[in-house]
């Protein structure tokens, strides 16, 4: 992709981010500390509450910043706090499973991307032994404090064993 096409894509994305008018009523976030459907979409209704891992706010991420180098990849990564706000919105409309998914994702933010891919591959049928999966679960819990994700990996180890879908120990 050439430089001009990339710049156009970035301009189009950035220009669409803040183009909506401010909400006409106060969002529930400011009144109760929890987000609800009234705060959705978060980027339009409560952009000042959305922060990058670097501390930059949603409004700090601009095309000029990207092009000038003051906004980098860490400035556009989601945080556990933002995922928690999304979970609260989901709960406010009765989407408990979606809320749980957002919270699991929040747990996994601390895990490096390369390690996430390794764990994902290990969870595929016949790619890991039960002991390897249990070691992953222990790592998730002890190193990354991802208790819910660790429980899912432990459950996968048990189910994999029961269904005969684990790698054979050689």
Image: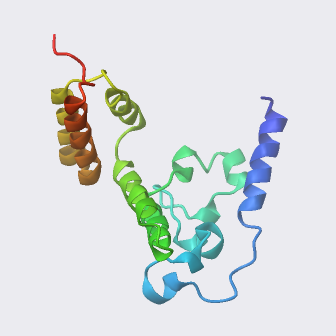
Q: Position of residue 2 (x, y in %)?
A: 80, 29
Up the image or down, 85 lies above or below 14; here it is below
Q: Position of residue 153 (x, y in %)?
A: 26, 40
Q: Position of residue 144 (x, y in %)?
A: 26, 47
Q: Is residue 85 visible?
A: yes
Up the image or down, 109 lies above or below 163; here it is below
Q: Quadrant of the N terminus?
A: top right
Residue 74 located left or right of residue 6: left
Q: Position of residue 55 (x, y in %)?
A: 48, 61
Going 60% across and 63% down the picture, which residue do you hit? Answer: 58
**Residue at far front of view:** 163
Going 26% across and 38% down the picture, which residue do you hit? Answer: 156
Going 16% across and 15% down the picture, which residue do you hit? Answer: 169
Up the image or down, 90 lies above or below 143; here it is below
Residue 88 located left or right of residue 24: left
Going 52% across and 85% down the picture, which residue do you hit? Answer: 28
* Of the pair 58 and 145, the residue shown nearer to us: 145
Q: Quadrant of residue 161?
A: top left
């Amino acid at each position: 992709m050439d430089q001009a096409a990339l710049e156009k894509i970035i301009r189009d994305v950035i220009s669409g981010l803040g183009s909506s008018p401010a909400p006409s009523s106060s969002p529930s976030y400011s009144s109760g500390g929890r987000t609800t459907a009234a705060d959705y979409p978060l980027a339009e209704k409560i952009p000042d509450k959305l922060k990058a891992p670097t501390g930059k706010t949603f409004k700090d991420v601009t095309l000029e910043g990207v092009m000038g180098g003051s906004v980098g990849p860490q400035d556009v990564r989601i945080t556990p706090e933002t995922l928690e706000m999304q979970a609260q919105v989901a709960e406010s409309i009765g989407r408990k499973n979606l809320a749980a998914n957002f919270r699991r994702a929040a747990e996994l933010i601390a895990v490096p991307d390369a390690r996430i891919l390794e764990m994902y591959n290990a969870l595929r049928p016949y790619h890991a032994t039960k002991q390897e999966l249990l070691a992953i679960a222990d790592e998730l819990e002890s190193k990354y404090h991802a208790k819910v994700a660790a429980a899912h990996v432990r459950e996968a180890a048990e189910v994999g064993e029961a269904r005969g879908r684990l790698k054979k120990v050689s």
